[in-house]
């Protein structure tokens, strides 16, 4: 499903060049659960952004479901990303102007899922995440843990092939009765 060969990422300014990733080689098969661990600043988020097709490596190869994607155009990457990858960002990235329901619904809109099916899928995932009672609230009306559950719901609602989670449970406390 995922294969990287000598993946590298450099960030450069006029004064300094910083190596964020240096020679990452890995292979992850369908169905595997992988945790990427390390100290702050070691490149975990950079790697997730590349694996999620949000950023390009400086060098090396990245194969996603058998396709070399490191050099795809942004349009091709966006097309592949919207149906195949779910994200839980460290800072949640919820849209303040959208309700909980609308934030979770967003990936299904991009995939052109019909209205009745969208509603059913969103309600199912909100129930599973014990956040249905907040469906009409806006992100700023939620606690950090509730925002995190909304972000997780949004990541899984379209049943993507790959879920990338950058510290997905740092602020989360399981709802009562679900521990």
Image: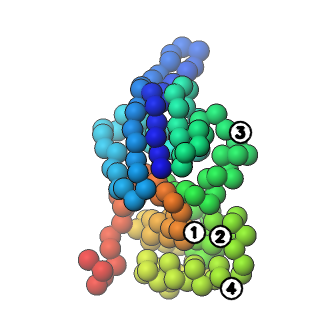
Q: Earlier in the sequence, mark 3 or mark 4?
A: 3
Alpha-carbon neighbours of circle 3 within 10 Å: few (<14), some, or many (≥20)?
few
Q: Residue at x 57, y 78 (%)?
A: 122
Alpha-carbon neighbours of circle 1 within 10 Å: few (<14), some, or many (≥20)?
many
Label 2 to label 4, Cα distance in Å? Answer: 11 Å
Label 3 to label 2, Cα distance in Å? Answer: 23 Å
Alpha-carbon neighbours of circle 4 within 10 Å: few (<14), some, or many (≥20)?
few
Instruction: Look at the image and tell me whether residue 138 can be seen.
Output: no
Q: Residue at x 67, y 38 (%)?
A: 72
> Label 3, on which residue?
73
Q: Earlier in the sequence, mark 1 or mark 3?
A: 3
Alpha-carbon neighbours of circle 2 within 10 Å: few (<14), some, or many (≥20)?
many
Identify the residue at the far top of this view.
Answer: 15
> Label 2, on which residue?
108
Q: Earlier in the sequence, mark 2 or mark 1?
A: 2
Q: Position of residue 63 (x, y in %)?
A: 53, 41
> With respect to residue 24, does 114 lie above or below?
below
Check whether the beta carbons of the residues at disc 3 and disc 4 lie within 8 A of each other. no
Check whether the beta carbons of the residues at disc 1 and disc 3 lie within 8 A of each other. no
Label 2 to label 1, Cα distance in Å? Answer: 6 Å
């Amino acid at each position: 499903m995922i294969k990287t060969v000598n993946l590298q990422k450099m960030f450069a300014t006029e004064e300094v060049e910083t190596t964020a990733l240096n020679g990452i080689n890995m292979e992850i098969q369908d169905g595997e659960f992988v945790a990427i661990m390390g100290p702050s600043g070691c490149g975990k988020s950079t790697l997730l952004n590349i694996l999620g097709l949000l950023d390009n490596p400086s060098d090396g190869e990245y194969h996603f479901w058998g396709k070399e994607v490191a050099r795809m155009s942004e349009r091709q990457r966006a097309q592949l990303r919207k149906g195949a990858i779910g994200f839980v960002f460290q800072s949640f990235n919820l849209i303040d102007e959208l309700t909980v329901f609308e934030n979770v619904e967003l990936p299904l809109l991009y995939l052109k899922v019909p209205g009745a099916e969208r509603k059913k899928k969103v309600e199912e995932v909100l129930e599973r995440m014990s956040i249905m009672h907040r469906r009409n609230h806006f992100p700023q009306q939620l606690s950090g843990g509730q925002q995190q559950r909304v972000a997780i719901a949004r990541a899984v609602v379209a049943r993507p092939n790959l879920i990338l989670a950058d510290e997905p449970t740092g602020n989360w406390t399981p709802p009562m009765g679900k521990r």
